[in-house]
């Protein structure tokens, strides 16, 4: 437990680990993400996350005043993880192949982290993503939009680009949700074939 003159939070005895102020928040997010893989977000509790990390509930509340704050942080971490996966995929190809690689990474992340993926899109406030500034968008959406734009001829107008970007996002997001809900097989070959069949021009 964090004392008034202590600069760290000890994990349970015998663990051999100690979390400093700058690390505890990340540890709580990681623990929350792991716990979400076996339950729904509404069943996740701050005290449970505290026990998982091995700290007091008081220490958790210093970083997250309530469960919704923790869930928002987990969702934000999910967007970062997805974006990193997509960025890595984008570096392996160019043009339409890069779009396909980014789209497949989007679906792959959803299948590997289903609870986090659902939380990412259920916890965000409703906003028209295509009226947001580029810097306001989460990395995965910026990458997807950029890859769609890269496959289009320069003469294409902004309205057409917006429609193409929405169509591309609807495709990969829809594939992810259908596979998670068991409505289509979570088959890499099928998902790749569907994404590659999209004519973005």
Image: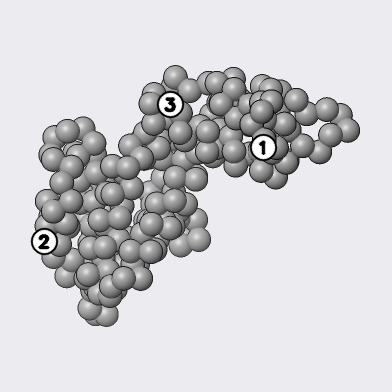
Image mark for residue 41:
3
Furthest-front residue in view? 14
Q: Is 155 situated above or below 80?
A: below
Of 51 and 62, nearer the camera is: 51
Query: What residue is shown at x 66% (from left), y 22% (from top)?
Result: 57
- Point out residue 66 in the picture as x, y percentages from the top left corner: 60, 25
Label 1 crowding class (10 Å Cα cut-off): few <14, some 14-19, many 20+? few
Q: Is 126 situated above or below 199?
A: above
Q: Nearer the viewer, mark 2 or mark 1?
A: 1
- Point out residue 65 in the picture as x, y percentages from the top left corner: 65, 28
Q: Is residue 45 left or right of residue 25?
A: left
Whichever of callouts 3 and 2 sits on the residue coming sooner in the sequence is: 3
Image mark for residue 197:
2
Q: Nearer the viewer, mark 3 or mark 1?
A: 1
Q: Is 79 situated above or below 41?
A: below
Q: How is the image coloured?
A: one colour
- C-alpha gap between disc 3 and disc 1: 27 Å
Query: What residue is shown at x 60% (from left), y 30% (from top)?
Result: 53
- C-alpha gap between disc 3 and disc 2: 35 Å
Label 2 crowding class (10 Å Cα cut-off): few <14, some 14-19, many 20+? few
- C-alpha gap between disc 2 and disc 1: 49 Å
> In the rendered image, which quarter contains the C terminus?
bottom left
- Point out residue 141 in the picture as x, y percentages from the top left corner: 37, 56
Please give the count of numbered marks on the rendered protein: 3
Q: Which residue is mark 1?
A: 17
Residue 157 visible in rendering = no
């Amino acid at each position: 437990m964090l004392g008034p003159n202590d600069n760290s939070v000890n994990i349970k005895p015998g663990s051999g680990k100690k979390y400093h102020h700058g690390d505890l928040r990340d540890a709580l997010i990681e623990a929350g993400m792991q716990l979400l893989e076996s339950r729904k977000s509404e069943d996740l509790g701050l005290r449970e996350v505290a026990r998982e990390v091995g700290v007091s509930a008081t220490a958790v509340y210093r970083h997250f005043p309530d469960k919704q704050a923790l869930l928002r942080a987990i969702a934000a971490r999910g967007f970062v993880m997805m974006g990193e996966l997509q960025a890595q995929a984008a570096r392996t190809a160019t043009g339409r192949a890069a779009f396909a690689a980014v789209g497949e990474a989007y679906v792959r992340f959803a299948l590997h982290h289903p609870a986090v993926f659902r939380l990412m899109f259920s916890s965000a406030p409703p906003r028209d993503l295509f009226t947001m500034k580029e810097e306001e968008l989460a990395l995965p959406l910026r990458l997807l939009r950029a890859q769609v734009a890269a496959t289009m001829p320069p003469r294409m107008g902004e309205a057409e680009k917006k429609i193409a970007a929405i169509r591309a996002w609807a495709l990969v997001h829809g594939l992810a949700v259908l596979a998670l809900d068991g409505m289509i097989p979570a088959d890499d070959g099928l998902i790749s074939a569907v994404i590659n069949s999209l004519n973005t021009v």
